């Protein structure tokens, strides 16, 4: 997987949008509305001030300025902006918390040789099916 491009957004969930169910994308996503389900991206996730995610989030990199009620796993970096509210556990290689951010949960920053996101969790892979 290449370098994350935080300025390029491929999928937008607008401020007036509400999604009931998981959002899985192979590229970047901007969430400005409400999502009741998991948000999984193989690239970059940006959560705006107006956004509310009630579910877990997985990405390569994330900038959170809205509310996330769930656990966050990021392969490289998470930035909690001054208007963010994270109510859940966080696991990332790097973490930036701006003054004013609210974070209620546990944080785990693995060593450089320990993967943050398990390979089977990536959005572009389908889980293996077991034969009966």
Image (spheres, grey):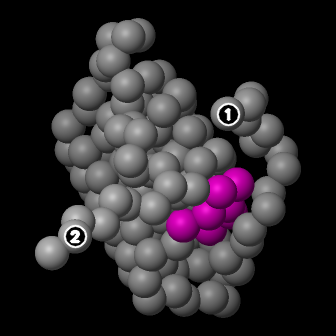
Which quadrant of the figure has residue 67? bottom left
Which badge, 2 or 1, is on the more N-terminal residue? Answer: 1
- Rendered location of residue 131, percent (x, y): 22, 70
Q: In the visual, does 17 lie left or right of 109? A: right
Span colored in magenta: 24-31
- Rendered location of residue 118, percent (x, y): 36, 39
- Rendered location of residue 45, percent (x, y): 61, 52
Q: From the image, tell me which residue sits under label 2.
A: 131
What residue do we see at 50% from left, 55% from top?
125
Instruction: Report the magenta stretch's main SS.
Output: strand
Q: From the image, tell me which residue sits under label 1.
A: 1
- Rendered location of residue 28, percent (x, y): 70, 54
Q: Secondary structure at mark 1?
A: loop
What residue do we see at 54% from left, 67% from top?
24
- Work out which quarter of the rendered image holds the N terminus and state it: top right
Of residue 99 and residue 120, the one placed in the foreground of this image is: 120
What residue do we see at 42% from left, 56% from top?
57
Q: In the visual, does 24 lie left or right of 132? A: right
Q: Secondary structure at mark 2?
A: loop
Q: Is any part of residue 13 visible from this angle?
A: yes
Whole-Å distance between the Cαs marked 2 and 1? Answer: 31 Å
In the image as oriented, which residue stretches furthest toward the front? 132
In the image as oriented, which residue stretches furthest toward the right? 8
Q: Which mark is residue 58?
A: none
Mark 2 touches mark 1? (CB < 8 Å): no
Is residue 121 on the magenta stretch? no
- Work out which quarter of the rendered image holds the C terminus and state it: bottom left
Which quadrant of the figure has residue 5? top right
What residue do we see at 37% from left, 25% from top?
115
Is residue 28 on the magenta stretch? yes
Q: In the visual, does 123 lie left or right of 111? A: right
Kindly report which numbered mark, 2 or 1, lies closer to the viewer in this rendering: 2
């Amino acid at each position: 997987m290449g370098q994350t491009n935080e300025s390029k957004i491929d999928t937008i969930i607008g401020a007036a949008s509400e999604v009931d169910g998981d959002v899985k994308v192979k590229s970047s996503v901007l969430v400005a509305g409400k999502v009741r389900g998991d948000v999984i991206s193989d690239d970059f996730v940006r959560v705006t001030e107006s956004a509310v995610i009630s579910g877990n989030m997985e990405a390569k990199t994330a900038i959170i300025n809205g509310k996330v009620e769930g656990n966050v796993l990021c392969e490289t970096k998470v930035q909690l902006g001054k208007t963010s509210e994270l109510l859940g556990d966080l696991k990332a290689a790097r973490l930036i918390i701006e003054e004013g951010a609210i974070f209620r949960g546990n944080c785990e920053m693995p060593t450089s040789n320990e993967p943050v996101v398990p390979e089977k969790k990536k959005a572009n892979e389908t889980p293996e099916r077991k034969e009966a």
